[in-house]
Image: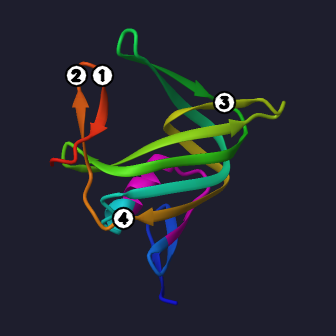
C-alpha cells in the first residue's frame, strides 16, 4: 500500500494508492479549500464525496424555463449528510461541480448545487481521481455546462 501525506493552508490529505482522504479545516470555505487541493494535486478529472457539518451554506437551483439560477444562503448549524460531485475543466481551470444535502436541527433537509459553505465542525472528503482530462462547455440553448469529449 502506497501512502503519502499532503497539507495546504486549509486542508490536509493522505493519498492511499490512487485515492485521497481530505480533511478541510474548521471555519474554512469548502469550495476554496477543495479547489486549492485539486490544483495542488493536479487532479483534472474525478469524483468527490464528503460528509461533515457547516453553519453557512449558499445553494443554487437552476430554472430551465428561463435559464436562470436562484441562489439562497442559509445561516444555521447543519449536518452535511452528503456531498457529491465531479472535477472537470471549464474555461481552462480545474472546477468542482458539487451537490449537497444538509440536515437541519428539525430533521428536515435542504439540497441543491453547492456554491459554497463554511465548515463548522468536521469536513471529510474522499477523492477518486481519473487519469484523464475532461472539459465542460456551456450549451447556450440549455444554459448549463456539459461534457465535451471532443476537447
Q: Residue furthest front?
A: 150
Query: Considering the numbered disc 2 on the image, is that residue within a helix, a strand or a loop?
Result: loop
The residue carrying mark 4 is 130
The residue carrying mark 1 is 143
Q: Residues within 10 Å of mark 1 (few under 14, many from 20)?
A: some
Q: Is residue 76 left or right of residue 34?
A: right
124 versus 56 height, above or below: below
Residue 42, located in which quarter of the rendered image?
bottom left
Q: Nearer the viewer, residue 15 or 76?
A: 15
Question: x%, y% of residue 54?
Answer: 65, 44
The residue carrying mark 2 is 140
> Earlier along the polypeptide chain: callout 3 or callout 1?
3
Query: Considering the numbered disc 4 on the image, is that residue within a helix, a strand or a loop?
Result: loop
Residue 64, located in which quarter of the rendered image?
top left
> Earlier along the polypeptide chain: callout 4 or callout 1?
4
Q: Residue furthest right?
A: 106
Q: Is residue 44 left or right of residue 86?
A: left
The residue carrying mark 3 is 110
Q: Nearer the viewer, mark 3 or mark 4?
A: 4
Q: Residue furthest top?
A: 66
Question: x%, y% of residue 148?
Answer: 22, 43
Q: Residues within 10 Å of mark 3 (few under 14, many from 20)?
A: some
27 versus 143 height, above or below: below
**Real-space Cα separation, disc 3 to disc 1, in angstroms:** 24 Å
> Earlier along the polypeptide chain: callout 3 or callout 4?
3
The residues colored magenta run 20-37
Query: Considering the numbered disc 3 on the image, is that residue within a helix, a strand or a loop?
Result: strand
- Disc 2 and disc 1 in contact, CB within 8 angstroms: yes
Amino acid at each position: 500500500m502506497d501512502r503519502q501525506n499532503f497539507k495546504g493552508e486549509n486542508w490536509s490529505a493522505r493519498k492511499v494508492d490512487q485515492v485521497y482522504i481530505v480533511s478541510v479545516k474548521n471555519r474554512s470555505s469548502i469550495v476554496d479549500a477543495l479547489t486549492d487541493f485539486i490544483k495542488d494535486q493536479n487532479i483534472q478529472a474525478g469524483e468527490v464525496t464528503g460528509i461533515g457539518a457547516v453553519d453557512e451554506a449558499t445553494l443554487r437551483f437552476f430554472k430551465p424555463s428561463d435559464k436562470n439560477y436562484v441562489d439562497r444562503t442559509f445561516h444555521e448549524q447543519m449536518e452535511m449528510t452528503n456531498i457529491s460531485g465531479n472535477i472537470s475543466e471549464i474555461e481552462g481551470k480545474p472546477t468542482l461541480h458539487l451537490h449537497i444535502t444538509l440536515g437541519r436541527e428539525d430533521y428536515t433537509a435542504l439540497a441543491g448545487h453547492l456554491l459554497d459553505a463554511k465548515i463548522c465542525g468536521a469536513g471529510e472528503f474522499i477523492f477518486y481521481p481519473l487519469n484523464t482530462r475532461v472539459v465542460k462547455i456551456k450549451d447556450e440553448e440549455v444554459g448549463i455546462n456539459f461534457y465535451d469529449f471532443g476537447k
